[in-house]
Image (tube, grey):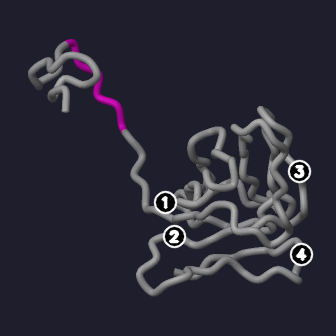
């Protein structure tokens, strides 16, 4: 699949799949920035991309992001196909969960992205559901 992409700082490389089996590509910070304890930082990821119609791009944390003291504050980011303007740079919304400032360096791999095919739901409203009611969270057991 060919994806149109714009880099804001051409000194940084294009996103990469780091291994032949990687399911997602890494995105890097465009600038050096500090995120204070208990605060949220919006880390610019140096790219705008044109997600094809019928697909969605998901921004997810790299498995090592927590080692820096950061979490993606919104869990994951949903990049719609129509978020593709010339200035629509992807950003990682990161929360510093530590009691110390966290420095993010230019070029640091912050998160990863995956492009997935998506279907739009067509609602069929009913008065009763067909399945048996299972209960709330944790209903399959304690372990």
Which mark sits nearer the N-terminus, 4 or 2?
Answer: 4
Residues at marks 3 and 1 touching, judged by CB atoms closer than 8 Å: no
**Residue 74: x percent and y percent?**
62, 39
**Residue 103: x percent and y percent?**
84, 55
Q: Which residues are magenta?
A: 122-127
Q: Which residue is mark 4?
A: 9
Dot 2, how many residues are within 10 Å of its Cα: few (below 14), some (14-19), or many (20+)?
Answer: many
Which mark sits nearer the N-terminus, 1 or 4?
Answer: 4
Q: Which element type, helix, strand or loop, lies under badge 3?
A: strand
Q: Which residue is mark 1?
A: 54
Residue at the front extreme? 99
Which mark sits nearer the N-terminus, 2 or 3?
Answer: 2
Foreground of the two, 86 or 111:
111
Q: Which element type, helix, strand or loop, lies under badge 4?
A: loop
Which mark sits nearer the N-terminus, 1 or 2?
Answer: 2
Q: Magenta stretch: dominant SS?
A: loop
Residue at 72%, 40% (x, y): give it: 95
Residue at the bottom extreme? 20
Which mark sits nearer the N-terminus, 3 or 1?
Answer: 3
């Amino acid at each position: 699949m060919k994806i149109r992409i714009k880099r804001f700082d051409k000194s940084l490389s294009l996103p990469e799949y780091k291994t032949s089996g990687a399911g997602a590509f890494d995105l890097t910070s465009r600038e050096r920035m500090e995120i204070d304890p208990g605060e949220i930082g919006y880390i610019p990821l140096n790219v705008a991309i044109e997600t094809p119609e019928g697909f969605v791009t998901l921004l997810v944390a790299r498995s090592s992001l927590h080692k820096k003291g950061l979490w993606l504050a919104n869990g994951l980011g949903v990049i719609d196909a129509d978020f593709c303007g010339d200035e629509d740079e992807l950003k990682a919304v990161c929360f510093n969960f530590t009691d110390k400032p966290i420095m993010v360096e230019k070029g640091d791999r912050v998160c990863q992205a995956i492009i997935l095919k998506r279907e739009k739901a067509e609602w069929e409203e009913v008065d009763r559901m067909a399945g048996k009611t299972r209960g709330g969270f944790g209903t399959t057991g304690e372990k």
